Amino acid sequence: MKDELKTKAEPRFVSSFIVHPSSFPKAAIIQPTDRSETTSYKDDLASRIDADSPFRFARAPQDNDMSTVSLEWFAYPPPEFAGGVITVGNFDGVHLGHRALVAEAKKLARSFGGPAVAVTFDPPPHQVLHPGPIRPPLTTLADRAELLHAAGANHVVILQTSPSLLALSPEAFFEDVMARQLGAKGIVEGYDFRFGRNRAGTNATLRELCDAAGLACEELPQVKHADEPVSSSRVRAAIVAGDVRRATELLARPYRITGNVVTGAKRGRTIGFPTANLADVPTVLPGNGVYAVRAAVEGRMWRAAANVGPNPTFGEDARKIEVHLLDFTGDIYGKPMTVEFVARLRETRPFGGAAELVEQLKRDIEGAKHALG
């Protein structure tokens, strides 16, 4: 009750928090400030995505300025976030189901003349409720915000997850966060939406609250692909199994990871196949195997082949990510690299020696070229 009463205080504004994905912090908390210090983002972020990223995203036309703000649950976002339609979720991966929610929110928001706002959480609520080993996400926070914008969200709100937020009853979360802080005129959620303390709020609860408050409320049915429901769990299972083609279908884009190029054993260069060793990858890794990939480094995209897993030919058991860029020469040690997985070429297996391995690597390169076009 104490936490719920905190919202009765005067509104607290936070500064807009706009960054390019490469510099997006994992959990940046914006301290409330005077509204006069709020800055607006006047560039078209979707255009920046297309210009700055070597990867293309299918996106709805953006007719409003777009921004991302990170705030505590009792703080107010900039006023331009209000008067539209919100959709709330973890949105890990931003898969087909998530994209459908954003698209419907965008459609309904146009009828009100307001923005479509995607509301997500950092960290995921389950990490606060059940502390322990962190399960790698499908997307970094930066990627999630970028992809939500690309899917059609005018604005993205990142609620800083805390015990006090998770302690709110469904009614308090609706009244204090959805209706008051976010100023929503409509809410769009999926068929399995749950909210409030102990996930007690259902779509029936939400509709009852919306009706009483005069808000529009829409529930989307389950999105399916190949007669199976689309979910973050299915995406994760496909990636872990190495089925990156299936992951691409569920995500409507190739799965990608980002890490830093570090110094390895440098054995590849001695056999004519130098590789970039990728470390510090915070997201889920595909299952062991050799893949046709596209790699982005220093603003350019390269066709490449990647090995995920150990190197049994040389007795190495450690799981690594090694990327061979086709037709590339240069020094990229210490540089960030993004790898987009297009197709799995084969499993990881030992070879009789370096000569046998080289012959297989030649076949892998040809297979990658064929898969990448």
Image (spheres, rainbow, N blue to C red):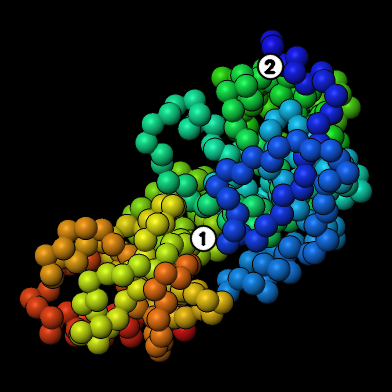
Is 350 positioned to the left or the right of 39 in the image?
left
Location of mark 2 (residue): 3
Question: At which x and y percent is residue 101?
Answer: 69, 46
| In the image: residue 353, left or right of residue 365 | left
**Above or below, 69 relative to 22:** above
Whether residue 239 appears in this view of the structure is no
Q: State the image quarter where residue 10 is shown.
A: top right
Q: Where is residue 59 shown, x and y percent of the image?
A: 70, 63
| Residue sitting at x 50%, y 74% | 296
Residue 278: image tag: none
- Amino acid type shown at disc 2: Asp
Q: Looking at the picture, tell me which residue is in the foreground, 106 or 295.
A: 295
Label 2 neighbour load within 10 Å: few <14, some 14-19, many 20+: few
Check disc 1 and report its element: helix, strand or loop.
helix
The image quarter containing residue 354 is bottom left
Q: Nearer the viewer, mark 1 or mark 2?
A: 2
Q: Is residue 142 visible?
A: yes
Query: Which is nearer the eye, 346 or 176?
Result: 176
First in sequence: mark 1 vs mark 2: 2
